[in-house]
Image (cartoon, rainbow, N blue to C red):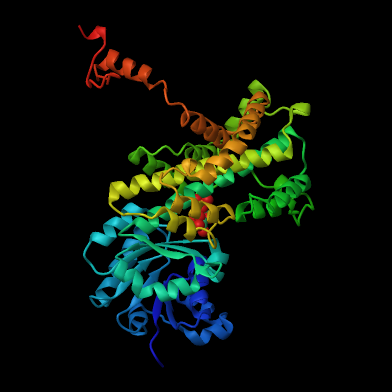
Amino acid sequence: MSKAEIGLIGLGTMGAALALNIADHGFDIAVWNRTTSVTQEFHASAGQLAARITPTETLEALVEAIAEPRAIILMVPAGQAVDDQIAALRPLLGPDDLIIDAGNANFHDTNRRSRDGSGPFLGIGVSGGEDGARHGPAIMGGGKRADWNRVAPILTAIAAKFDGTPCANWMGEEGAGHFVKAVHNGIEYADMQMIAEIYGILRDGMGYGPDQVARVFNRWNEGPLQSYLVEISGKVAGATDKETDKPLLEVIVDAAGQKGTGRWTAIEAQHLAAPIPCIEAAVVARNLSSRRDARAEGERLFGAGPVPMGDAAPTEDALENALICGKILCYAQGYEMIAAASEQYGWALDLPTIARTWRAGCIIRSAMLDDMATALAEGSSRNLMFAPHFTKRIQESHAALRQVVATGVAHGVALPALGAGLAYFDAMRTARGTANMIQGQRDFFGLHGFERFDGRKDQHGPWAE
Ligand code: 6PG
């Protein structure tokens, strides 16, 4: 039997789906899982695709089953498990054999693994969940371009397509792919949070039931907000719990989980001094959502936050435009952070390529991303706000964002991400800010010095005498 063209380790949800996708596109693949029964069950349930899948029961057998120079995908939990798997695998490989970490690794780990000299290494961000992995993910590659080119025929074949163009691209050296994936996840958090905030206004401010919420999101998914997340939010709102026959949203506990990728983005933004308030607000909102007992105590002591908006309620169109504006501002922050990292790490990341990669397959895929790719390619600024197409869309929608945030504030509906977006917008159009007061304070208590408008630096106030 001819040897496999590629190997895969880790037949969990994502790994199994990716392996089937690879086989489904006509590539022979060898697979191994630490638990042999998982490998056997995977192969037994692969149907016609089993003919292209070689199940193996040892790492040695896996390596032997792959044609040289080998390429082996790791789909194992991020962190120590990846290092352990590499340590077990490398001694079995030749000097040209390529290891590809396709998990949600922290890009700092991928930088380290790329530099450890143990052999060719790629870190790729794979987005789209299980369905994406099986039927077409978005793939963000990091590592040496030559190593990407070795496996690009397979990765572009299995990737989602936008108008026939694969959503799989090399981002840059070392951890660039996992970094872009982390920013994708940060934006994902913010997109999800802003949708949840609009849901909060509909539910608590306007008294909408889940079916009405579903109707609104389903209608918006036909317009400028067309996106996977708006689409599934309509489906979640319209879902019925089989056990109780109640709307599903009424039985789900309001505490958000997080595997941590969005948190990594918020942490890294601080290292880069990149302002991403919408993403940071979304991570904080997830942290706050887990403090259910404290929030119940707060309601008991201070009375419930949200109160009905009555005639002050925004129209559905205003809510739609507020979400459009918040989304644009959030993506502007995300792209600006990517540009800051590109400078910091010398990656030469291409923003239009990144936006094009996100147009299909990934969790944040949306109609707006194609416009963003075009605007970023045409624009001279790294801030999406200043790309003419989006400058116009913000000019048309920021009044709605302000009205919605103001109404939410007046009626106790927490809007941390939408509110952060509005504050970011206002700060980004205030040429004379108030940080002069901060500079004065810092100099008063620490003689840290300040710059004067006449250009003289390291100046001090009268308190310095
Ligand atoms: C994707 C998703 C995925 C993410 C999980 C859980 O792009 O397919 O972003 O990678 O890790 O959906 O994410 P959280 O637990 O952090 O919400």
Rendered image quadrant of residue 437:
top left
Q: Tell me if residue 23 comes above or below residue 398 in the rendering.
A: below
Q: In the rendered view, does 425 fall on the left or right side of 229?
A: left
- The x and y percentages for residue 95 are 23, 75
Q: Is residue 9 visible?
A: yes
Q: Nearer the viewer, residue 396 or 74?
A: 396
**What residue is shown at x 74% (from left), y 36% (from top)?**
315
Q: Residue furthest bottom?
A: 1
Q: Is residue 259 visible?
A: no
Q: In the rendered view, does 241 fall on the left or right side of 110?
A: right
- The x and y percentages for residue 440 are 32, 15
Rendered image quadrant of residue 254:
top right
Quarter the C terminus occupies: top left
**What residue is shown at x 31% (from left), y 66% (from top)?**
145
- The x and y percentages for residue 421 are 53, 35
Q: Nearer the viewer, residue 86 or 231?
A: 231
Number of numbered discs visible in the structure rendering? 0
Q: Tell me if residue 230 comes above or below residue 136 in the rendering.
A: above
Q: In the rendered view, does 342 fall on the left or right side of 157?
A: left
Q: Tell me if residue 20 comes above or below residue 257 in the rendering.
A: below
Quarter the N terminus occupies: bottom left
Rendered image quadrant of residue 222:
bottom right
Q: In the rendered view, does 334 fall on the left or right side of 237?
A: left
Q: Tell me if residue 64 comes above or below residue 160 in the rendering.
A: below
- The x and y percentages for residue 327 are 56, 44
